[in-house]
Amino acid sequence: MGEPVSRRTALVGGGASGIGFATAEGLARAGHDVVLVGRRPAALDRAAATLAERTGAGISTVVADLATDLPRLTTAADVLVLNAGGPPPARILDVTDDGWQDAFELLLRGPLRLARAALPAMAGRGFGRVVFVTSTVVRQPQPDLATSVVLRAAVTSAAKLLAREHADRGVTVNCVAPGPTATDRRHQILAARAGATGATYAELDAADVATVPAGRAARPEEVGAAVTFLASAAASYVNGTVLTVDGGRTETP
Ligand SMILES: NC(=O)c1ccc[n+]([C@@H]2O[C@H](COP(=O)([O-])OP(=O)(O)OC[C@H]3O[C@@H](n4cnc5c(N)ncnc54)[C@H](OP(=O)(O)O)[C@@H]3O)[C@@H](O)[C@H]2O)c1
């Protein structure tokens, strides 16, 4: 009811690779025009060309650092996927003041800046979907991902507040919380753990996967599918929730 029938525009953070790229592909296949945002122009151009060839959708790019910038086209987005890289791994007592500040800008302040710009415009058009890509650490903390554990709990609370702001205007705000997902980010975390512990990368990979009932890491498109669902018109009554995509790993219900 009251939703536009024209093609929708989806702005996807970190869209050049990993979960962002897979999400962009899901949204493009679902009929959206997609704007990819990231810091490396060449990587964005490569991703855009690949997606346009695979899906036939309209794909454009905006170069921006989501920790510090408000990307062009943010207010035009009907769908906003708040996704970027993760902070460096560290245990809580090892995070410096600068480490906290950088993680705060990347994980909380930057996404909130975009949400603040996009949500009123969405409400004015009578349709909007905001999806924060967070992590299962919001439900099951991991000691060596301290900034992510602490700040993504705050993101989850922020998303809940945002979800209630324009719920009566066709706008929803949700989180997708991935578990281990086969991307550059997972590779970097396992490599960092290998450097810190003396265990091999292969041992750490096997130990991580052993904690997942599905017995493997997610393919990025499995996370992208969850975001694409929450971005759809069909998800109109799903609001203010966290959808874990983790092969069953999180132990709490
Ligand atoms: N992979 C996992 O196992 C996993 C598990 C749980 C949660 N997550 C979370 O899910 C999110 C996506 O993860 P991923 O595995 O896809 O990460 P990834 O492989 O590191 O890819 C991140 C993408 O975001 C872009 N990016 C990074 N920092 C950015 C910034 N400041 N501004 C704009 N773009 C930025 C990168 O491109 P540029 O460098 O060119 O900007 C890259 O395209 C992260 O927040 C991560 O913490 C991942």
Image (cartoon, helix red, strand yellow):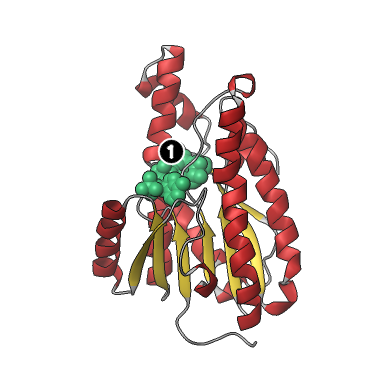
Residue at position x 45%, y 53% in the image: 222
Q: Which residue is mark 1?
A: 216
State the image quarter where residue 237 is shown: bottom right
Residue at position x 70%, y 53% in the image: 158
Of the four image quadrants, the one with ligand 1 is top left
Give the residue type at disc 1. Arg
- In this rendering, would 212 be left or right of 184? right
In the displayed structure, 161 sits above or below 201; it is below
Q: Nearer the viewer, residue 77 or 171?
A: 77
State the image quarter where residue 128 is shown: bottom right
In the displayed structure, 43 sits above or below 180; it is below
State the image quarter where residue 246 is shown: top right
In the displayed structure, 100 sits above or below 47; it is above
Question: Looking at the image, which residue sits at the far top?
Answer: 198
Residue at position x 38%, y 50% in the image: 39
Residue 127 showing in the rendered view: yes
